[in-house]
Image (cartoon, rainbow, N blue to C red):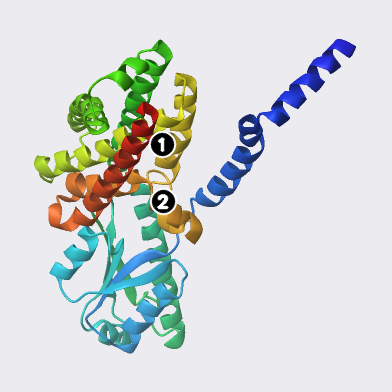
Amino acid sequence: MRKAIAVGKKEFRQIVRDRRTLMILLFIPVFFLLLYGYALNFDIKHVALAVEDRDNSVESRAVVSAFLNSGYFDMAATIRSSRDLERVMDGNVARAALIIPENTGRLVRRGQPAPVQVVINGDNANTAATVMGYAMTIVRSVSTSLIVEQRGLHLVPPIDIEPRIWFNPELRSTLFLVPGLIGFIGMITGTISTALSVVREKERGTWEQVRMAPINTVSYVVGKTLPYLGISLLSSMGIIVAAMWLFELPMRGSWGSLLLAAGLFLLGALGTGLLVSTIADTQLVAFQVTLILAFLPTFLLSGFIFPIQNMPRPIQLVTYIVPARYFLVALRGIVLKGVGLGTVWGHLAALAGYATVVLGLASVRLARERG
């Protein structure tokens, strides 16, 4: 027992002296608990709502107020035509739209059914089903209050809801999960491939030859990135084709737009891997750093599984540095909605900016190591 205690004391002193190990043991678990404890939330709130009130009566305003006061919907836009509706839905300005036709108030006062339409973005099947349930409950509640106001003269609910699901009318969860998986797989494979390729040279002792080679750092980074970019693009396109064949994933947009979005996203992933390689000296450490920088944020903070709008504001700010957040919006827009580059240009610009930053940082750090 004394020998075991002696070994334990020695190990404890070694852990205290090794600040990296101590940081991993104490800080990382607390960090993950706080980050993902707040981020992981299946509740659907603050759904962006567009409203088209063609009646503008007391009854129609009561319906709009019921939606906005429920705590589940936030006013995102006021629309006046079907073109406005397509614009806000394609651009993710709103995830649902409430359309109240003319003569709604007059029909309610006569005791006749007055239909209102709720259009829901169905690219996320689970969210769409929940939003549809919210809308039906709210309309049912408004109908009950109107019956009470009319002193029970009309037993038929005066307002009837007509839900309509866009982009995924059957609410197939596969159409939501498969694009997310494409981004997730691309981020992981791209980051790991370049990270391990450079670290492998350090472990094998060939890094010294690279340092002495008559080649500048930019050329080295480009040469390291291009082969993996070509292979990753080919792999991503193969995954999409396989998903179209196996899971009936539609392709409503342009293949050129999809190739551009995938290329920018993979450039950022490969740049992240190169940046990791400047930090890690062994393949095990590179894999662990990749897990923290690529795997967990892409899975949890990109909107792949958990809606970003339901996260606390500080966590939402963190998601702005997760490239998969932008790629998934662009990918689902091109594949499921058939939007063009004009609709997703902001997300593509964010991907290009991220790739530029990480490749630039990787080049600077590699230049220092070679120097």
Which quadrant does the N terminus fall into? top right
Estimate the x, y position of residue 345 in percent, counting from the top left. Answer: 19, 55
Question: Which picture quadrant has residue 98?
Answer: bottom left
Estimate the x, y position of residue 117 in percent, counting from the top left. Answer: 26, 68
Q: Is residue 254 left or right of residue 107?
A: left
Amino acid tagged 2:
Thr
- The reply to whether discs 1 and 2 touch (Cβ–Cβ < 8 Å) is no
What residue does disc 1 label?
294
User: Mark 1 or 2 closer to N-term?
Assistant: 1
Instruction: Decide if residue 30 is in sight here.
Output: yes
What residue does disc 2 label?
319
Residue depicted at 39% across the width and 29% down the height:
369
Q: Is residue 264 above or below residue 202?
A: below
Name the residue nearer the viewer: 197 or 363: 363
Q: Is residue 275 left or right of residue 50?
A: right
Residue depicted at 14% across the width and 52% down the height:
341
Amino acid tagged 1:
Ala
Q: CA distance from mark 1 to mark 2?
A: 12 Å
Q: Is residue 364 above or below residue 348?
A: above
Q: Secondary structure at mark 1?
A: helix
Name the residue nearer the viewer: 75 or 56: 75
Q: Is residue 104 left or right of residue 146?
A: left
Residue depicted at 27% across the width and 31% down the height:
217
